[in-house]
Amino acid sequence: MSATHAALTELLPLAGDTFDKNKVTPGVLGFIVFAALALAVWGLMKSMSRHMGRVDFQEAPETGAAAAAPAAEKAP
């Protein structure tokens, strides 16, 4: 028997006696994990917004539309 298996068999009956199976909540650890994920998403969105603000994008005209426009202007 491994140490992990022995620890689980000793601790699980204790957990079963003290907790109501109908009222299990995530607790403090769940809140900390959720808050850390929320902060990470907020930081990533702020960084993405900053990087998108730095982009200077100018679309090049399409060659087909540019060639058709002068031809349309010359026609009566």
Image (cartoon, helix red, strand yellow):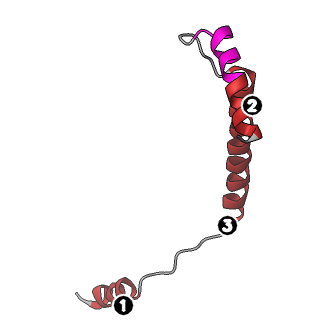
Confirm or deny contact between disc 3 and disc 1 (CB under 8 A): no
Residue annotated with mark 3: 55
Q: Is residue 63 above or below residue 4?
A: below
Left or right of 59 on screen, residue 72: left
- How crowded pointer 2 is (Cα within 10 Å; few <14, some 14-19, many 20+) is rated as few
Q: Residue at x 53, y 10 (%)?
A: 22
Residue nearest the viewer, comparing 33 with 69: 33
Q: Which one is in front in this view, the residue at disc 2 or the one at disc 3? A: 2
Left or right of 64 on screen, residue 34: right
Q: CA distance from mark 2 to mark 1?
A: 78 Å
Looking at marks 2 and 3 on the same chain, the residue that comes earlier in the sequence is marked by 2
Where is residue 69? Give x, y as percent. 34, 84
Residue span colored magenta: 11-20
- Dominant secondary structure (helix, strand or loop) of the stretch shown in magenta: helix
Q: Residue at x 36, y 83 (%)?
A: 65
The amino acid type of the residue labelled 3 equals: Val
Residue annotated with mark 2: 7
